[in-house]
Image (cartoon, helix red, strand yellow):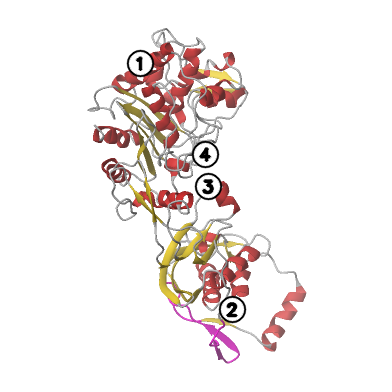
Amino acid sequence: MGKRRRVAERRRTHRPAVIGGMVAVVVGGAGFAGYVLYSGGAAAEDRTSSAASAEKPKVKTGPLSATEVTTAARTFLTSWQQAEVAEAAAVTSDTEAATKLLTGYAKDAHLKDVTLTPGTPTGAKVPFTVKATVAYKGTSKPLSYASSLTVVRNTTTGKPQVDWHSAVVHPDLKDGDTLVTGESGTPPVKAMDRDGGEITTEKYPSLGSVLDGLREKYGKKAGGKAGVELQVVRGKESKKAELSDKTLLELSKGTPGTVKTTLSPGLQAAAEAQVAKRAQSSVVVLRPSTGEILAVANANKGFNVAFQGSLAPGSTMKVVTSSLLIEKGLASADKTHPCPKYFTYGGWKFQNDDKFSIKGGTFKASFARSCNTAFISQAPKLENDSLTQQAQQVFGLSMNNWAVGVPTFDGSVPVQSQAQMAASLIGQGAVRMNPLNMASVSATVESGVFRQPYLVSPDVDGRTLAKASRTMSSGTLSQLRELMAYTAAYGTAAEAMQGVYGNVGAKTGSAEVDGQKKPNGWFTAYRGDLAAAGVVQAGGHGGDTAGPIVAALLKKGS
């Protein structure tokens, strides 16, 4: 960001009415009608002094009353609206952080004429709308948005206060982020799909974070000129999570440079339609022969789970684990393989879904039905780093070196021991993936070699794509394809994959998450020169949730 001229904080131009020694403050909005009266003066002090000296006041505990919620919210919103930063911050749980961000609201974001209108509280949560004017060097534009706050009880004083997070000020802010208006340091970009059509959030609502990432990466390289904008400027923690700065309002247009992507307009539109049908869903489609990303979509527009999510992949990880077991001679598709009801390792007792077992079954049958103990039972024969090395060396995962063109999380398969190592074999423990990673796993099986996924061709900027150090043997690859094909035809993926014909393979997954009633549902599959993976958070079994999304896109891409 360039240097910006600071302006003085806006002063109050009116004073609250004084009625008989009492101050009346009015804030409009449902649930906040009427006056709030604050008593003062010597008489009030006299009335309370004797009681205070008689006994130490008790700290109030228990749930907040409706009056406590509305009073605390009203005090905070009134003070913020009147630019009384110290007063507003004083009724929050983090006075220092609130003071800094609310001060910057006027000085750095150049927001004035702020009007805050509360809505009807739901329990301790109070929604409100914000209307303001962004004014910078003679240029101004109106800004409006919705936010919310939550009132909590201070455990030390017992008083109600606003639970402070930066998102209170604006929902796109993470803690540590700031709002800044000025000449943006990064020129805008015009992103194009593979056919030359412009990519916009109006056309593809999921791609806001992708466009932000493209601008951050290529804005200065694409030949554009910066404009004046109100932006979310990411703080230290957001940058660690690889979140890009975000434009909230454009005061004057810059001149965009052009960046061509690999996205397919037809598949992208289909992906958008699919995730719109299922809450908390995300999906990615790749071309295995090249690594090109053809589509990416998320039901939640606030965070790109498909590229940057870090979630336990559940049984979809068994694709990687199976390749390991076959290579080490611990499993073979058509040979008998144990699938007991329980298996104990490292002090943990593992079991299968619904506690089923397969007596005298093959490894192919265990893979197709997603038998956990078939994999856990092999843990004593593996080294602690066996799965980590397989993921890195064959599938290109867990090395944090992908150069996609926008920020991504490249999977994590850390070295573990005992029960945690066993859990990692079935995609639990500390293993973390996202749909981009798992689509890449299917793409590696389909093509026989890892090709790093990318959204912008490396020819554009000469960057180096990640490579895997080795490939699977032809025998291992053949068996792995057999396992995935059998699962798509007869296993847990069969219902979702009905009508998906040709060279196909699939694997389902369900990942338990603490605090969730339903597991995250996963599905990864390929069809010819297409590979895709999806997740539905808190959705249930992958075959029922993510499966239909992935299958529909594989059909669309034919």
Query: Decide: marks 4, 2 in contact (CB < 8 A)?
Result: no
Q: Classify mark 4: residues with Cα within 10 Å, few (<14), some (14-19) or many (20+).
A: few
Residue under label 2, please give it.
Answer: 8
| Label 3 – label 2 distance at C-alpha | 33 Å
- Report how far apart the C-alphas of labels 3 and 1 lie in the structure: 38 Å
Taking the image as drawn, is residue 369 in sight? yes
Question: According to the image, label 3 marks what residue?
Answer: 242
What type is the residue that disc 3 sits on? Glu
User: At numbered mark 1, what does the secondary structure look like: helix, strand or loop?
Assistant: helix
Q: Which quadrant does the C terminus fall into?
A: top left
Left or right of residue 539, residue 83 in this image: right
Work out how far the residue at label 4 is from the one at label 2, CA to CA, in angstroms.
48 Å
Q: Secondary structure beneath disc 2?
A: loop
Residue 552 spot, x, y in % from top left: 27, 35
Circle 2: residue type: Ala
Residue that badge 4 annotates:
514
Q: Earlier in the sequence, mark 1 or mark 4?
A: 1
Q: Amino acid at mark 1?
A: Glu
Q: In this rendering, would 401 be left or right of 294?
A: right
Relative to 454, residue 238 above or below: below
Q: Is label 3 in a helix, a strand or a loop?
A: loop
